Image (cartoon, helix red, strand yellow):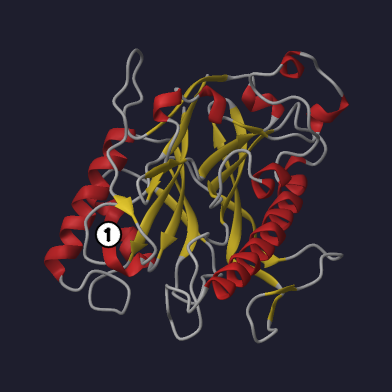
Amino acid sequence: MLLGTWNLENLYRPGGPFGPRDKAAYEAKLAALTAVVTALDPDVLGVQEVGEPEALADLLESVGGTWHAALSAHPDGRGIRVGVISRTPLEVLADTRTYPARLRPVQADDSGATSDGSGRGFLAVETVTPAGPLRVAVAHLKSKLLSYPGDRFFPRDEGERARYGAYALYRRAAEATALRALADDLLAGDGRERDVAVLGDLNDEVQAATTQILLGPPGSELGTRGFESPDQGDAARLWDVAPLIPAEHRYSRINSGRRELIDHVLTSHRLVHRLTSAGTGTDTGPGPRKEPRLPSVGGDPAARRNEPGSDHAPVWVRID
């Protein structure tokens, strides 16, 4: 089976404040997204930035075939939320934005206002695959692309930039901690026997502190000597599949000309030992693969409002 994650970039129907301005632009976006989903041909795909459930329904109708979909009921202020689409039926296990009980609210802006939960809900589902039950959590953590009071995307000075960078980091770290708590619930202390995956746009790279929070006990990452040595931490660990992605393809977004892998697939012990390949983009076949073709984005996300497709590439794994 093929399991993946993809940020669809502001999937709204036309006419609203965030989606394409007209029907022609919307149809071009749907056509571009449809081509990617069709080429990827996933069995289960975590999705982010679904602005309207109706727009996701339009996309699945365009792709064709039988699909099951589940969406979080906790969008952010722009209405975007996470979801899962699957070829097999989905059971929702959790849909939450709360921080763990001992984690206090974190500062969110210069006014002293605090954030007491994730900006976008985390969705956890279960589906039954030919290999047995699969539990999946999908998330979209706080962005590194900063916004400032008055709907500005550029700071008044470097002090403001530094403060709002810190506020974003506080929030992303708290959200990663909450997502790890959800993963603990899904693993139930039994990752050696349970197929569990955490998917999503984590808005930071593999070695970032926020990403590392999600992995659990250290010392067994793919590509290290510890990976081949079973230990007590295996029941609780998650493994980032990034080392399995060919180095030249190890990016899911281009930010101001710099390649970044900010979209991730994390798997439990039972799953990681059944992975046969991993990649980005839509070339999932054996042998040499084509690199993802992505636009370079800047600090103003509204600049791509009328553009087709997405500014992210899918990240995927194939499981035996």
Could you tell whether 189 is left or right of 145 in the image? right
Work out whether 302 lies above or below 209.
below
Disc 1 residue type (three-letter): Asp
- Outermost left residue: 24
Quadrant assignment, res 121: bottom right
Work out whether 272 lies above or below 111.
above
- Outermost front residue: 158
Could you tell whether 272 is left or right of 257 in the image? right
| Residue 17 or residue 188, whichever sits in front | 17
Residue at the image position 62 percent from the left and 71 percent from the top: 163
Work out whether 253 lies above or below 147.
above
Could you tell whether 194 is left or right of 83 in the image? right
Residue 25 x/y as whole percent? 16, 64
Quadrant assignment, res 136: top right
Residue 210 x/y as whole percent? 67, 50
Residue at the image position 36 percent from the left and 25 percent from the top: 284
Say which element carries label 1: helix
Marks counted in the figure total: 1
Residue at the image position 50 percent from the left and 83 percent from the top: 149
Residue 105 x/y as whole percent? 76, 73
Quadrant assignment, res 300: bottom left
Q: Tell me the residue that label 1 is attached to.
A: 58
Residue 37 x/y as whole percent? 31, 41
Residue at the image position 76 percent from the left and 26 percent from the top: 192
